[in-house]
Amino acid sequence: MLFYIEDNGYAISVPSSLQTPGGNIAENLGSFNNLFVQEGDGTDPEQAAMLITKAVGFVRNKGRPALLRLTVPRLSGHSGQDTQAYKNKEVIAAEKTRDPLPKLHDFVVPRILSQQQWEKFQIKAEREVRIALEGALTRQAPDPKKIYRYVFMEYKGEGEPELQRVGGLTTDGLAFPRITTQPKPETKAINMAIAIRRTIAYELKINPKFVVFGEDIAAKGGVHGVTRGLQGKYGPQRVFDTSLSEEGIVGWAIGMALGGLLPMAEIQFRVVVNF
């Protein structure tokens, strides 16, 4: 995994010196074992390209994580409403002198491109941005009746279900089993934990993209016992524990889903206290 940080020195209005000791995450993590740490000037085309190539090559060849921090200026506000009034004139002027676009121009013209070729690329980029902006401004408002689309698997009458287009499920040609409308009756009543465990086990069996993770769900089998025995049967790559971070668990699940997996994340307990 490559941790790539474009460090513009701010989190909205708060400078990095108040976010990270010394204002440099690379220095803070420099003593981490087995983490390859590099940093440099993100506005310098040659240096940035060299460091990116070096970091990517290290991750791919060594199979170990790397962290690359490139410093860049933030030339506009964090959002459309951010006027950057918290920056003085000297800071804004200094940031403009580090604008990476003129530096890129000076690096590639005429060494790689002619001025005429550069201007053609510039016109093409401006046209693409203008077309994208016009498309966004003229796009119709979303239909509130479709707010629940893709929350559950959708069937349109007979045939295969409609898959969400984001992610790799469709492109990888994953075929979901047909769901029968006639449930098989149990010979005896079962509790909710057993029913959930059987459902999870069935999904793990038929779908290689299905993964289960959360706090204490592996060796312990979950505080409610719904994942008991599943790691032993399907392995730690399919059923595994996480750190105690509910926000992290949700984030991992979202990332896995966008990447084409079908994650089932368990949030053990989530208590909200209002004062």
Image (cartoon, helix red, strand yellow):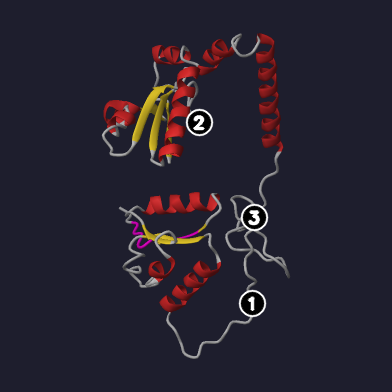
The earlier-in-sequence mark between 2 and 3 is: 2
Characterize the local packing of mark 1: few (<14), some (14-19) or many (20 or more) Cα atoms within 10 angstroms. Answer: few
Characterize the local packing of mark 2: few (<14), some (14-19) or many (20 or more) Cα atoms within 10 angstroms. Answer: few
Characterize the local packing of mark 3: few (<14), some (14-19) or many (20 or more) Cα atoms within 10 angstroms. Answer: some
Left or right? Give the position of 240 relative to 78: left
Q: Are marks 1 and 2 in contact (CB under 8 Å)?
A: no
Q: Is residue 239 placed above or below 142 in the rendered structure?
A: below
Residue, disc 3: 170
In the picture, the quarter occupied by the N terminus is top left
- In percent of width and height, residue 154 lies at 65, 63
Q: Amino acid at mark 1?
A: Thr
Marks 1, 2: nearer the viewer: 1
Left or right? Give the position of 148 relative to 52: right
Residue 13 forms part of the magenta stretch = no
Residue 74 showing in the rendered view: no
Q: Main secondary structure of the magenta part?
A: loop
The earlier-in-sequence mark between 1 and 2 is: 2
What span is colored magenta in the figure? 263-272
Q: Amino acid at mark 2?
A: Ser
